[in-house]
Amino acid sequence: GENVEQHPSTLSVQEGDSAVIKCTYSDSASNYFPWYKQELGKRPQLIIDIRSNVGEKKDQRIAVTLNKTAKHFSLHITETQPEDSAVYFCAARFSGNTPLVFGKGTRLSVIA
Amino acid sequence: GAGVSQTPSNKVTEKGKYVELRCDPISGHTALYWYRQSLGQGPEFLIYFQGTGAADDSGLPNDRFFAVRPEGSVSTLKIQRTERGDSAVYLCASSPGVYNEQFFGPGTRLTVL
């Protein structure tokens, strides 16, 4: 089945710097890649997603890139702010009727 | 509108007991998913429903776990003979269809003593 690896497990950046989190997936037929942000004790919330027919997607300070050949995708956060501090999870889905497979998460700390 | 809700928010039980966890999806969402999240891990798939039927239950760890969605809306996850290893946060998510974004509930934190 699908396997998703996420790196790094923890990341500390200075406020205003950029943060990059990377994920790799095993199944080349995967076609949907969401990113979730989870604050302590809260529910995961979708922040951005990308489908396999697109190489990059941007939403204000957040962008996701997808390299289908290498089977990896990355989350980029620019101009980080303290409120960006949270655990971020990537996920992949093999096809429309299969469940999401999540990475183990990255704990991002933005230091003011 | 109202998001996904889950009850109870916390459940403490003793080893060997039976528990039921409830999920109320967003109105009109046909797909409903159950995940389990252990400390420091990502959500782990358990089962999902399309309408009333379980479309994929391959993530249920063993036959002590069972879930139902009799009317295609509310779902209940049932755990028999609970074990300490079942302690985790149980998350529910719903989506308008299986091709759409999943919206998560706040989770139920289950502690088995």
Image (cartoon, coloured by chain):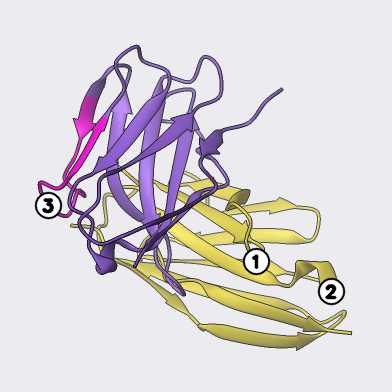
Chain colours: A yellow, B purple
Name which residue lies at 56% across and 61% down.
A65
Residue A82: numbered disc: 2
* Secondary structure of residue under mark 2: helix
- Indicate the chain on which mark 3 is placed: B
Is B90 inside the magenta-drawn segment?
no
Which amino acid type corresponds to the residue marked 2 in the rendered image? Pro
* Secondary structure of residue under mark 1: loop
Residue A22 horizontal/vertical position (percent): 51, 74
User: Residue at label 1?
Assistant: A40
Task: Specify the segment rendered in magenta.
Answer: B54-67
Along the polypeptide, which appears first: circle 2 or circle 1?
1
Which amino acid type corresponds to the residue marked 1 in the rendered image? Leu
Mark 3 Cα-neighbour bin, 10 Å: few <14, some 14–19, many ≥20:
few
Return the residue nearer the eye: B94 or A22: B94
Name which residue lies at 12% across and 52% down.
B62
User: Residue at label 3?
Assistant: B62
Return the residue nearer the eye: A5 or B2: B2
Q: Is residue B78 visible?
A: yes
